[in-house]
Image (tube, rainbow, N blue to C red):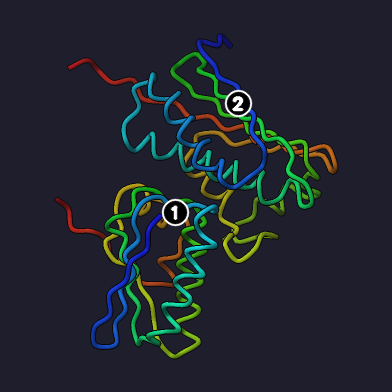
Amino acid sequence: MKVTSGYQDGKLTLYLQGELDHHEASAALRRIGRTLDDYLPQDCVIDMDGLTFMDSSGIALILKISRLMEETGGRAWVANAKNQPLKVIDASGIDRMIKISTAAKQ
Amino acid sequence: MKQHNYIKLEFPARSVNEGFARAAAAAFAAQMDPTMEELGDIKTAVSEAVTNAIVHAYPDTVGPVQMRLRILDGNVLQITVRDRGRGIPDVKKAMEPMFSTGGEERSGMGFTIMGSFMDGLKVRSAVDRGTTVTMSKRIQVKANA
């Protein structure tokens, strides 16, 4: 999995690409933690447009990012969720804890 | 029940094999002509079951994980993931949503997702003898265009 980021006006966007599983999650979380420390953003958008697969490790990653943001008074949400990753999000019920915005239908 | 085709795989409980296991399962299931959504469901369930074995079964060693896929009557795919690890003392509790003894990269949603993405889910476990997860899913037969 690849994670890139963009920062503008207090908002950090994390672009997730590829497949997110337990094997990828620890390293991704370390990288994302460092990026959050560098920018200390007010808002963090987890953009899933390029994510082709995720399992429940992705749910843990989203919750962890949300917790890290809350610790510094910010907030996180998910954008462009679609297909298989969206189905995992729906099954987990985390939309009760964090805002999930889905990709526009093509 | 008649078995139409099957594969058996064994690999060490290393996290790098999670991606391999779900890709192998998807490649085998392709002969059943699944939709993209059904294929995604199979990959997700395999990823969860194999990850559980890798994270929980062998805390101090790297033991074997076996995966078997069978095509049964009625276009049903049966997936079995088995380890010979430490086992689960309380299967019912382990299957509760958000229950986890894993690290921060685990959410405790593995069994919930396996159950919701597959038609059948059965977990058998014995302490110090291992765990067997059996899942099944009926793949819809498409009408010929």
Seen as rendered, the residue at the extreme left is A106
Q: Residue A96 at what x, y percent from top left?
A: 43, 69
Image quadrant in which you'd find residue A46: bottom left
Mark 1 falls on what kind of element? strand
Which quadrant: the N terminus of chain A? Answer: bottom left
Q: Residue B90 at what x, y percent from top left?
A: 78, 50
Q: Residue at x 37, y 85 (%)?
A: A39
The circle drawn on residue A20 is 1
Tag count: 2
Q: Which residue type carries mark 1?
A: Leu
Chain on which label 1 sits: A
Q: Residue B34 at what x, y percent from top left?
A: 35, 27
Q: Name the residue that disc number 2 marks.
A: B9
Q: In the image, B17: left or right of A105?
A: right
Q: Which residue type carries mark 2?
A: Leu
CA distance for labels 1 and 2 = 23 Å
Q: Is residue A65 above or below residue B11?
A: below
Image quadrant in which you'd find residue A79: bottom left
Q: Is residue A98 above or below residue A1?
A: below
Q: Residue at x 49, y 37 (%)?
A: B22
Q: Residue at x 53, y 29 (%)?
A: B136
